[in-house]
């Protein structure tokens, strides 16, 4: 994706011209943007039936669990940032928790130093049954629909059931992802049978039918989430987990609870910023970094310049140092969120940023890992409801385990815990993992202005930050903002996407950064912008995934426009 100097308006001359790969969509009655066109189609069908943004979001999630199986499923975890038509917000924390039988030293670690700090013997926290934690997705999807949707569960699940039962064409992205994980998937009969063809990935365009999963979806549609959390589907999964050395019990499933909390709020350049609170660390650190940037002329520095990228890297260093030291499960760890997101703390930390040279910010504990394989979707209706939702099974295809007879892929969220005892994110029975998810909504004058999010593990909240800055400071369109080259660091090497020019990379090296060019930072970002004067919504999805915006406009016929016999 090339970048060229922009010519034209004086205020744009300090930023690169972003050449986009995809096109946005505009609409007035509703918008759905997901990382697969069939996921978006399922959501827009709900809006066309008179449903709202929450109905659309839940329909899309079930559909994505079929067509984007590497990224999301009912046996996963996530966060929802939901704005209701009356202007109130609810953040649903449906992150997974460690089983009751988990222990801080349940894995044998490989090293106490980075980069192998998170590795354990046999990859047990990544691949196989001991990597599985207690899921929250299905419960949250059904609870959100019941609380804020208008359609019934069977209706919103109908598209997903159809895709699973009758099949869907495999995209190149999915084919390549299966191919990259074929060896691990092949270890588990259920996964091999569902996703592989004689040990190989299906070719792009080949139809993939998931008949066993279709039957599980039909059971969920008929009986609700209890069929998993206290019923035969859950029992079948637990029996398979226990038979193969995993830890989850039916009591663990029965005990699982989602948490609905008020969001964190901040401000940036006259806009309100609404983000999730812990156990997601993402919202805290987006507000923290925006506070830091408030004291700099970000627009004047320009997009993609040495100064602009250096400043972003310094802000990320501050955020990650604090993340590793303070963030954990809010039920077990006291976190100074108000202080971390305060203007006073930002002013204090701003003094640590040196524009002439990369700084070594105060370190917390050891660095950590979090998978990039997640999904995000953004939906909106004409009434003012907005759903900004990030969900995952952690790594691609989670634990790589599909429970035979159910078609259900299991997460590997245990990989997100620190495998060493004694830290805020170490393993403990019932503890929630710390996440970097950050489904974010911005308002102007109490009306939606921008909603967006992305997959990407530890790269999520820095990528969301960059998209906000791209729109607010650099004046980009949403399509440009989500597709623009990104950078990332957690205090070590500075990753820069290959579209960043060589001269800029050399300038960053001269300032003391260890620059590592990468194909992509984080995953398929998508979002919606809102024009409060015209009511037009613009949806955009980036080149890093199969994302597609679909909108609905038009409306009912005018009164009197019907056909019929006229009186004579």
Image (cartoon, helix red, strand yellow):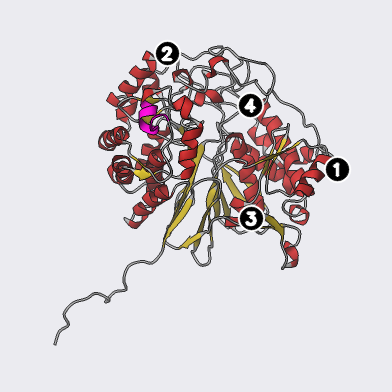
Quarter of the picture containing the C terminus is bottom left
Residue at disc 1, secondary structure: loop
Please indicate whether residue 81 sits to the left or right of residue 144 in the image. right
Residue at disc 4, secondary structure: loop
Name the residue tied to disc 1. 356
Residue 250 appears anywhere in the view: no
Residue at disc 3, secondary structure: helix
- Cα separation, mark 4 vs mark 2, equals 26 Å
- Cα separation, mark 4 vs mark 1, equals 28 Å
Type of secondary structure dominating the magenta stretch:
helix
Label 3 crowd bin: few (<14), some (14–19), many (20+), radius 10 Å: some
Q: Earlier in the sequence, mark 1 or mark 3?
A: 1
Q: Earlier in the sequence, mark 4 or mark 1?
A: 1
Name the residue tied to disc 2. 245
Residue 161 appears anywhere in the view: yes
Label 1 crowd bin: few (<14), some (14–19), many (20+), radius 10 Å: few
Tell me, for residue 471, which label it has, or none: 3
Q: Earlier in the sequence, mark 3 or mark 4?
A: 4
**Segment colored magenta:** 190-199
Q: Which of marks 4 and 2 is nearer the N terminus?
A: 2
Q: Report x, y in % for residue 434.
A: 57, 29
Name the residue tied to disc 4. 368
Instruction: Depth check: give the residue in front, 18 or 227.
Output: 18
Tell whether label 1 touches label 2 (CB within 8 Å): no
- Cα separation, mark 3 vs mark 2, equals 49 Å
Q: Which of marks 2 and 1 is nearer the N terminus?
A: 2
């Amino acid at each position: 994706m090339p970048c060229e100097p922009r010519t034209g308006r004086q205020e744009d001359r300090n930023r690169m011209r972003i050449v986009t790969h995809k096109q946005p969509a505009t609409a007035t009655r509703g918008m759905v943007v997901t990382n697969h066109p069939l996921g978006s189609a399922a959501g827009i069908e709900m809006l066309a039936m008179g449903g709202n943004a929450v109905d659309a979001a839940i329909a899309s999630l079930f559909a994505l669990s079929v067509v984007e199986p590497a990224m999301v499923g009912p046996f996963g975890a996530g966060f929802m940032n939901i704005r209701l038509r009356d202007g109130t917000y609810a953040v649903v924390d449906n992150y997974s928790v460690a089983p009751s039988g988990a222990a801080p030293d349940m894995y044998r670690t490989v090293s106490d130093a980075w980069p192998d700090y998170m590795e354990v013997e046999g990859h047990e926290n990544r691949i196989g049954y001991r990597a599985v934690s207690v899921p929250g997705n299905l419960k949250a999807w059904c609870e959100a629909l019941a609380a804020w949707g208008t359609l019934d569960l069977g209706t919103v699940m109908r598209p997903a059931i159809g895709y699973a039962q009758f099949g869907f064409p495999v995209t190149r992205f999915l084919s390549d992802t299966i191919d990259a994980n074929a060896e691990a998937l092949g270890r588990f009969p259920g996964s091999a049978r569902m996703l592989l063809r004689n040990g190989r990935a299906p070719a792009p365009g080949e139809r993939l039918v998931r008949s066993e999963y279709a039957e599980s979806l039909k059971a969920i549609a008929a009986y609700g989430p209890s069929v998993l959390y206290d019923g035969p589907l859950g029992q079948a999964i637990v029996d398979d987990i226990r038979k193969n050395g995993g830890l989850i019990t039916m009591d663990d499933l029965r005990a699982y609870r989602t948490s609905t909390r008020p969001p964190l709020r901040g401000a940036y350049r006259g806009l309100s910023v609404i983000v999730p609170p812990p156990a997601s660390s993402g919202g805290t650190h987006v507000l923290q970094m925006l506070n830091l940037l408030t004291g700099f002329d970000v627009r004047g520095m320009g997009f993609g310049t040495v100064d602009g990228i250096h400043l972003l890297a310094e802000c990320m260093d501050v955020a990650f140092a604090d993340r590793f030291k303070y963030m954990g499960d809010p039920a077990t760890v006291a976190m100074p969120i108000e202080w971390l997101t305060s203007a006073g703390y930002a002013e204090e930390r701003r003094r640590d940023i040196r524009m002439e040279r990369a700084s070594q910010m105060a370190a917390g504990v050891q660095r950590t890992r979090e998978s990039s394989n997640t999904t995000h979707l953004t939906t909106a209706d004409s009434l003012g409801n907005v759903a900004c939702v990030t969900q995952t099974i952690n790594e691609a295809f989670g634990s790589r385990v599909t429970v035979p007879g159910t078609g259900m892929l299991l997460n590997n969220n245990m990989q997100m815990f620190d495998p060493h005892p004694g830290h805020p994110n170490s393993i403990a029975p019932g503890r929630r993992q710390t996440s970097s998810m950050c489904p974010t909504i911005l308002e102007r004058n109490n009306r939606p202005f921008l909603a967006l999010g992305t997959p990407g593990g530890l790269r999520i909240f820095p990528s969301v930050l960059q998209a906000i800055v791209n729109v607010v400071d650099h004046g980009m369109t949403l399509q440009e903002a989500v597709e623009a080259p990104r950078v990332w660091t957690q205090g070590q090497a500075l990753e820069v996407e290959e579209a960043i020019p060589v001269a800029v990379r050399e300038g960053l090296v001269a300032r003391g950064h260890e620059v590592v060019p990468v194909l992509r930072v984080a995953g398929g970002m998508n979002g919606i912008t809102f024009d409060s004067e015209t009511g037009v919504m613009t949806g955009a999805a980036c080149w890093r995934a199969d994302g597609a915006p679909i909108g609905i406009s038009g409306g009912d016929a005018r009164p009197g426009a019907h056909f019929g016999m006229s009186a004579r």
